[in-house]
Amino acid sequence: MEEYSIFDMIGPIMVGPSSSHTAGAAKIAYIGYKILGEEVMEVTFTLHGSFASTYKGHGTDKALVGGIMGLLPDDENLKHAFDLAKEKNIVIGFKEGDLGNVHPNTVRIDLTGVTNKKINIIGSSIGAGKIKIINIGNIDIDFTGDYTTLITHHIDQPGIIAKITTILANSNINIAFMKVYRPSKGEMAVMLLETDENIPHSVIEEINKIEKMNSVQLIEKITG
Amino acid sequence: MNFSSGEELLAKAQELKHIYNVVMKYESHKSNKNEEDILDKLKLSWHIMQEAIQQGLDKETKGKGHMIGGEALKMKERYTHNNTICGNTMAKAISYGLSTMEVNACMGRIVACPTAGSSGVLPGILLMLKEEYEIPDEKIIKGLLTASGIGIIIGKNASLSGAEGGCQAEVGSASAMAAAAVVEIMGGTPAMALSASAIALQNLMGLICDPVAGLVEVPCQKRNAIGIANGLIASEMALAGIESVIPFDEVVHAMKEVSKLMPSMLRETAQGGIATTPTAKKFEKEIFSQR
């Protein structure tokens, strides 16, 4: 059962025309931008289902392009996303594709950053502006962006998770949800922590210093 | 304070007198915010709702597909000259709904409630109530809380997405949300509010989502108008003491079942309904050849 806020019902405050196809799309792309953690140089969007059939009409394309530049769903600049992307020389590709047994409004985003860093994510826009990120870097995961979300990529070995949670506990940050994923034992694992409080930058830095920590990304709660 | 069904909401509302009190406690607990902050955020939403309506009434706003634009002004023309069949209250609410949808279509700023495709219903009805019945903003905000409670239950147990449930999930839900809000604002009981929502949802059950050229313009804009009329009719009946024979929760469940039976062609893919009529196809061709 979905956990709704009243601001999923009265909201989001957004630029039209479609909460699922415009606001939700912008939100997924924005999260992609945050996970990449740097400005985007190149992007390919693979659109599935209803996203594929109707994306042009709903401005889904503009919303996605705006999102990967860090624009939020209520930003009136979304309308001009293609012009803004052109100014930044971002190479943009759109294609249609079957992403499997997923929600009808699903997109895969392949991003390359200015330092040549690459990531890919898959997200679904599940209605009323709500979204779910279901895959990062080919690992199936599940989070909504409704909470402050910390994503760590680290080597799967004993003690690392304890170190992370200790740092959070020392900063009085309460973990609401926590999930760990790994392709197989001892490899690069992904951990998702959704917290009730905001996580200050100093805490992120501290977590980043943990040995065997590959990367730490913070996605602040998206309000609207 | 949590609730997942109409029955639970009603039981808690009987304790706290109004649905909006229950919803406020739910949100406060869920978001860890105090009531003041939540009210402030709702006030901002209400402000943006009214701003969007005004934007579409100030000048003709053409949608991206140029299929809609100027309808709100045409309706305004009728009620300003007291020349209406449905009465000025209905005509006014409709014009406000049309207006929001025009602004939405041209990527203007609106408040999704619950979705952008159904964003004309609740603001249209509430601004009409505010003006015609001199309802203070504080009371309108309570109406937004009541409406949210209904939306949350539909979202949890069925769907609010056209791609999943068709237009019944969007305009149908908006209409049910608005109906409950009207009942509480106009002094009805929580049970009456739930009856109004149940009636409103039943009346639009099975409504498909068939956007011409995939745009949120046709038939969406005018479907918002029927969502408004339907919401007002349902609340009028409920306030008169007419009950929904089928309880709200059962209607929501039925709606979910209907969603499952609805082929994807009729769920926002623009592959069925009026979206595949010859005229719709002509518009689709024209709109996309311009790009």
Image: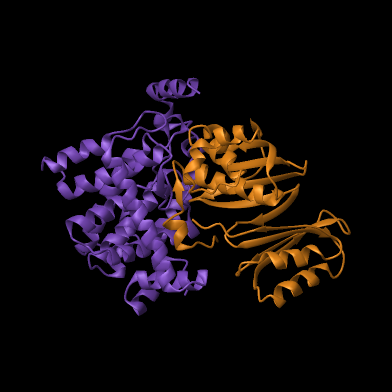
Query: In front: B180, or A91?
Result: A91
Q: Residue at x 10, y 43 (%)?
A: B82
Q: Return the x and y of residue A107 as percentages of the image width and height.
A: 62, 41
Q: Is residue B217 left or right of residue A69?
A: left
Q: Give residue B107's position: percent from left, percent from top.
A: 43, 39
Task: Answer above or below: position of A165 versus A32.
Answer: below
Identify the colour of chain A in the image: orange
Q: Which of the 4 image quarters holds residue B199?
A: bottom left
In the image, what residue occupies the spot 51% across and 69% down? B31
Indicate the position of residue A17 as horizontal and vertical percent values.
Answer: 44, 41
In the image, B8 versus A116, the foreground residue is: A116
The picture places residue A97, in percent across and down from the top left corner, at 66, 34
Most extreme residue toward the left, as rendered? Answer: B82
Q: Residue at x 82, y 53 (%)?
A: A183
Q: Residue furthest front?
A: A87
Q: Tell me if residue B248 can be seen.
A: no
User: Does residue B48 appear to the left or right of A137 in the view shown?
Assistant: left
Instruction: Indicate the quadrant containing the N terminus of chain A: top left, top right, bottom left or bottom right.
Output: bottom right
Q: Is residue A23 left or right of residue B243?
A: right
Res A63 → quadrant? top right
Observer-nearest of B145 and B85: B145
Task: Count numbered badges in the picture.
Answer: 0
Q: Is residue A14 left or right of residue A222?
A: left
- The picture's colour for chain B is purple
